[in-house]
Amino acid sequence: MQTNTILGLLKNGILYPEKLWQEEVSENISWAQYIKFPVLPIIVLVGVVSGILTKVFGYHIPVIGVIHPSMSDVVIQAIGTIVIYLIFLILMGWVAAYLAGLFDGKNDWNKSVQMLFLTSIPSLFGQLLSPLPYIGWVIALGLGVYTMVLLYKAIPVFLGVPLESRAKHFILFLIASFVISMAVNISIGSIFAPKNLMQGTITDIKTMTHTNDEVVHQNQQQKTHNNEDYVQDYVDAMAKGDYNKDVIKDTADDTFIAPPNNRLTRKQVEQFINLAKKVKIVEKEQAKKLKEKYDKKEKSDDFSLTDIFNGLKDVSNMATLEMKVVKTNGGNWAEYQWVKDRIREAYYTPSLNQTTQENAKLLKGHDEVISSIL
């Protein structure tokens, strides 16, 4: 293993990134070869060292304290770090290259993977040090932001995207990476979750959060806005960045037992349509506000750190917007998703079986609204 080369990449990737890019961009190498070296040795190093530090210092969980994982949890975490990073790098490499082609740049998967790896070196180093008590998360956060700044600067270098289109490419890439990251973590990430640690702490966590959850639920039930006023209030709150930060946790706690026959009720259909209308209104308003906001950013030469943080907040808001509207209107996210799936089945395949035929009858008179929602 070329130790000097790996150490040089790590050092230059953090201290002299732009000089490193100029040296690396001229290399003609396929993304598959690049994954073998230097990506794989470095990500294995990060996974192993991070696992060792986690074993030594433990997981620092707010309120609960420090939990020391078993050796099996440490091994699973290290493998998960390696596998998820490689999958994400390859997928997002394709996305970044494809977007570059849309904005008069080079649709070059090889250069795209190279760019993403080199700009992610600071965040990898931050991930490696994140288990350190007290300062680990601060280092990881700072280096994560540094990685985003580097990525923004590297897009024209590796993919030839014109400066006037760089902001569009960057924002679309962030949105895509957020969505794909969630999908990868939910599907593949669950395989590498530390099972022993989760089982050992879940009871304590539920006990500590039960009282707080009841308070949150009671507060939500007290909201009695008129539909039209509520939608406007919600749009104004989103514009200010005042959104329900606990919405993902709240939706995860929702449960719904579907009827054995999978039949909808008229009340469920009407409630869904009411909520979905609000979602569409808020989405339209938010899309308009974001378009106005980032149209102005396209004319600037560079983003500040504040702009990047605001961009991430905007992406987060849009990605969970439907959840937020449903929950803040007193809806059950699990039931809402089930009803949505049954309506989609009945709308697109009404003659599939007896159930879809009966459900389709409940949609009569709502065809225009449902087509715009689905």
Image: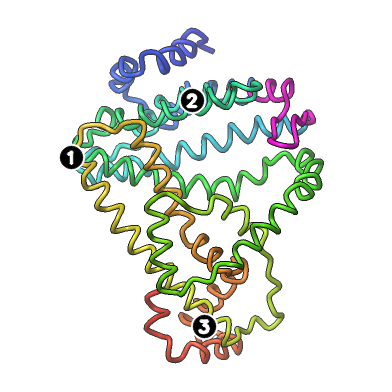
The tag earlier along the polypeptide, 1 or 2, is: 2
In the image, 82 versus 321, the foreground residue is 321
* Residues under numbered marks 3 and 1 in contact, where contact means CB atoms less than 8 Å apart: no
Secondary structure at badge 1 equals: loop
Q: CA distance from mark 3 to mark 2?
A: 52 Å
Please indicate, yes or no, whether residue 48 appears anywhere in the rendered image.
Answer: no
Query: Mark 2: few, some, or many residues within 10 Å (few <14, many ≥20)?
Result: many
Amino acid type of disc 3? Glu
Spot occupied by residue 135 in the image (x, y as percentages of width and height): 59, 21
Q: CA distance from mark 1 to mark 2?
A: 35 Å
Residue denoted by label 3: 270
Residue 41, above or below 261: above
Q: CA distance from mark 3 to mark 1?
A: 45 Å
In the image, 210 versus 39, the foreground residue is 210
Amino acid type of disc 2? Val
Residue denoted by label 2: 39
The structure residue drawn at horizontal position 51% and vertical position 39%, both measured from the top left corner, is 87
Spot occupied by residue 217 in the image (x, y as percentages of width and height): 65, 61
Amino acid type of disc 1? Lys
Please indicate, yes or no, whether residue 214 appears anywhere in the rendered image.
Answer: yes
